[in-house]
Amino acid sequence: MKKNILFVLLFTINFIFSQKELSKDYSYTVSAPYKVFDASEKIYFSKNNQSIAIKFDEKKVLIQKFDSDKPAYLKEKLYEKFFPKNYRVEDVLEFDSKFYVFYSSWNGDEDKEQLFSVEIDFDKGEFMTPKLIIEINGKLSGKKNFSFFGGGLYDMIDGTQDKFDFLVSHDRKKMLVQYRKKPEVRNDKKSYDVIGLVAFGDNLTQISEREIKMPYTERRMDNLDYQLDNDGNLYLLTKVFHDDSNDDKKRSKDELANYHLELFFIKNETNELKISRFENKDKFITKLWLFDSPQNFLVCGGFFSNGKGDLDDSDGVLAFKIDKQGNIYDSVSHDIPAEIINQYESEKTKKKNDKKEKKGDVPKFSNLFLKDLIVNNDGSLILVGEQDFVVTHTSMGPNGSTSTYVRYFYNDILITKIGVNGELNWMKKIPKTQSGGRGQGGMSYKYFSANDHHYLVFLDNVKNIDLPIDKTPALHSDGQGGYLTAVKIADSDGSLTKSSILNGRDIEDFQMHQFSVNRVFKTSENSFMLEVYKKKKEDIMIKVILK
């Protein structure tokens, strides 16, 4: 039996914690309110019974400590001008049971790149002394971004972020920092990528440092993903084109991809490059990820298209294993059945899909992007994809002026389990329609696993809680309230239940504001917390128990 639960918060003048029973699968506790800190980026970590929030706002950085058990705000420390003027946060992550902020710093007129680490003293909730861990002669390539997260001057002059990629092994005991040198030749038909690899062990002690020239020109290859195993070996998955066109598909009747996949294996502390080839042939890759596993192999999983229609739309799931010598084996693929695609769709869409099937052109799962890939302890795989797309409307005014209206959509979720032997165990479509005008905002979902179940948490329209399979989901408009919803899926057979956790607009003494799935974080095997704004310059922390 499913029922909607109203989320009622009662604070006494002494801020006694209140607890309400939700459905039979959930309970929650709410902290007393505490002063808000406006920040462009907020990152959360948990350890034992405590949590920290690291909040970046240009030159100011705040570290807050919380008791995860009650929950309760404990203390905070504000840093002003702690980081250098021209800095860029590259990553914030857990490594070797410690927590670090990694940032790059532009070195003025000098042609030099630097990477620093700052360990966070978790118990004190404070930064420790920054350390220079990598210094490189020459410029690096990275993504372009002109936001003001970090040092604003750095963004305007250089405009480059994500110069370094961080790979942490499955046991979190080794870390590899990868970077790409700016090519000396600007012609990508003639230039070859030079990839830098710096390995670290305990206490961020550097193990090795090397630069490797890729075997193909930039035009001929496209890097898909990296992974590091517990032995420090590196695996690089790449798309290798058959010509210089850089086109995924050639205009021919055979409908074969104009590329194949190659796995580059680089053994720890060597420059030796071993290549394993994977012939995808009639499968056009939309997204593939590499993951280490608790077993003696790595896994690769993602989505593919059959090459007809939009190549960004998906026809099925693809996976293969990789041994610790870099060899590919046990590749499997499974189509997404038409009956799955037609679930929760309108009659018009289903009729359109039926016509396609009769013509031999099976319907696709449109705009599907891989968001999570989970390797179970037995080596089975969970792949979670979400429909993610943008619609732009341009209109012209009477005086010839134009205006542009952009809407962001985060719609249905597809979750699939592939068994140990490559068999399709189950596949489920989770219906939702989320739309907003400010990027991701409070849309998309958060994934958790606990108690042999998979949980997908997101804001939804309450009308969808018992949605029939032949009905389309009602729209949830970002920033307009919504019910925090949890979909609980059994790992064994894919059976699922859907429950409302709270109503963000119907709360006794405040409404929930500034919700984001990026502010939802796991605190234990069976609990998670989320931080939201309650107006009056105050935040609160909500703890949810997964039973």
Image (cartoon, grey):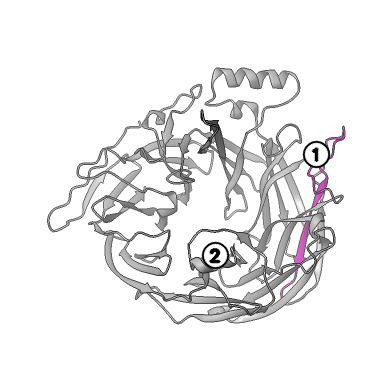
Marks 1 and 2, the one that precedes in the sequence? 2
Q: Percent x, y for residue 416? A: 59, 41
Q: Percent x, y for residue 471? A: 48, 22
Residue at horizontal 60 percent and vertical 20 percent from the top: 350
Task: For residue 390, say whether it is visible.
Answer: yes
Look at the image and say whether residue 319 sits in the magenta stretch. Answer: no
For disc 1, the marked residue is 282
- Give the SS element for disc 2: helix
Q: Is residue 508 above or below residue 242?
A: above
For disc 2, the marked residue is 155
**Which quarter of the figure is the N terminus placed in?**
top left
Task: For residue 524, say whether it is visible.
Answer: no
Q: State the CA–CA distance, disc 1 to disc 2.
A: 42 Å
Q: Percent x, y for residue 311? A: 71, 38
Q: Which mark is residue 353?
A: none
Q: Which span is picked out in magenta?
A: 246-268
Residue at horizontal 74 percent and vertical 74 percent from the top: 211
